[in-house]
Amino acid sequence: MRMSLHQPGFSRPLRPLLLAAVLALAACGGAEVLIIPLFEFIFSANNVVVGATTYTVSASFTPSNPSASNPSNPSSSSGTFSSASLSVEGGDSYAATGSFDQCNIALNVGGNPVSPIAAQYTGRFTDDNTLVLTRVGGALPDFPTITLLRDPKSQRSGGCG
């Protein structure tokens, strides 16, 4: 059965919206939606356990391609960090380099990091306020997976999750 926008099943007010949606999809060829992660604020985890010690770890990121409206967030869905850091409360702070591609990140930690900070991580935003860092290499008990929460939580959606 062929349907027309002029058939009784389509209400008059919805016709322009439906037409706009169809034209938008046709113009972009059905391309996937790009997700731009939100790096604003500090991320922290107060439950990083190594042996009998619990650490608080914080992370911050600055994209090298900042948005004009908010320099803490990137202007595109992928890029590199102009600066990034991981720090342990009451301990050391480490500069890091890395990149992001939509909800995924890769980090290389500078210096000679010691537990609980690993030298290299892959990461993924599991939602707009949670970033899970998984160490690449290193012994598991000394370098656990770190689940960082945005502090304070963002009220905007970056599309991850």
Image (spheres, rainbow, N blue to C red):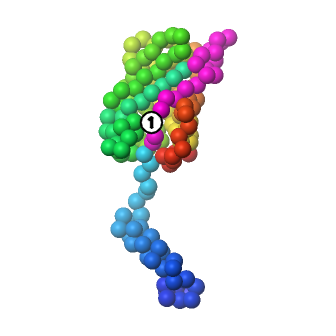
To which residue does mark 1 refer?
Answer: 39
User: Which image quarter is the N terminus in?
Assistant: bottom right
Crowd rating for badge 1 (residues with CA inside 10 Å; few <14, some 14–19, many 20+): many
Percent x, y of residue 82: 33, 29
- Main SS, magenta region, reads strand
Q: Tell me the kind of residue under disc 1.
A: Phe
Residue 38 makes an appearance in the image? yes
Left or right: residue 23 compared with residue 49: left
Would you identify the image quadrant in which residue 51 lies?
A: top right
* Extreme-bottom residue of the structure: 7
Residue 145 makes an appearance in the image? no
Percent x, y of residue 95: 39, 19
Name the residue: 49% across, 84% down. Answer: 5
Left or right: residue 80 compared with residue 148: left
Left or right: residue 41 compared with residue 55: left
- Which range is magenta? 37-56
Percent x, y of residue 111: 39, 13
Name the residue: 38% across, 31% down. Answer: 62
115 or 16, nearer to the observer: 16
* Extreme-right residue of the structure: 52
Whether residue 45 appears in magenta in the rendering, the answer is: yes
User: Which image quarter is the C terminus in?
Assistant: top right
Percent x, y of residue 7: 53, 89
Name the residue: 45% across, 15% down. Answer: 93
Name the residue: 46% across, 21% down. Answer: 86
Whether residue 13 appears in magenta in the rendering, the answer is: no
Image label count: 1
Picture layout, residue 119 above or below residue 70: above
Element type at marker 1?
loop
